[in-house]
Image (tube, grey):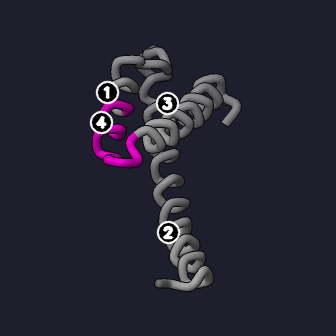
Amino acid sequence: MKSLDEIRAEIDSIDKELIALFMRRMDCSRAVAEYKKANNIPILNTDREDEILNSVEQKGGKYGEYARELYKKIMELSRDLQGEVISNKQ
C-alpha cells in the first residue's frame, strides 16, 4: 500500500498535467469563439454538449457520473470565455 505522501505526490503530478490540458482546451474554446463571432454562430450548441456529456459519462466507467459533472463545469467555463471573447472583453 502506498503512503499518503506518495498518493498526494501522484495527485500533484496528475494535477500538473490536468492544468496544462485545461489551458490547451481553453485556448481551443477561444478559437471556437473567434470562429463563432466571425460567422455569427451562437455560443450554446446543446446538441454538441449533450453528445460530449453522454460520451464522457460512458467513457468514465464507474466514475461516469462524476466525469459528466466535471465536463458540465468545463463547458460552462468554456461558454463564459466564449462570451467574453465575443463581447470583446478578452
Q: Amino acid at mark 4?
A: Ser
Give the quadrant of the C terminus: top right
Q: Secondary structure at mark 3?
A: helix
Residue stretch rendered in magenta on the structure? 53-64
The residue indicated by pointer 2 is: 14
Q: CA distance from mark 1 to mark 3?
A: 19 Å
Dot placed on the residue nearer the N-terminal end, 1 or 3 = 3
User: How many numbered discs?
Assistant: 4
Q: Are marks 3 and 4 in contact (CB under 8 Å)?
A: no
Q: State the residue in front, 60 or 75.
A: 60
Question: Counting other residues with Cα less than 10 Å from the Cα at mark 2, is it few (<14), some (14-19), or many (20 or more)?
Answer: few
- Numbered circle sitting on residue 33: 3
Q: Residue at x 56, y 85 (%)?
A: 3
Question: Counting other residues with Cα less than 10 Å from the Cα at mark 3, is it few (<14), some (14-19), or many (20 or more)?
Answer: many
1 vs 3, front mark: 1
Q: Please say if 49 is above or below 12.
A: above
Q: Residue at x 60, y 80 (%)?
A: 4
Dot placed on the residue nearer the N-terminal end, 2 or 1 = 2
Q: Are marks 1 and 4 in contact (CB under 8 Å)?
A: yes
Q: Amino acid at mark 1?
A: Glu
Q: Secondary structure at mark 1?
A: helix
The residue indicated by pointer 4 is: 55
Q: CA distance from mark 1 to mark 4?
A: 6 Å
Q: Amino acid at mark 2?
A: Ile
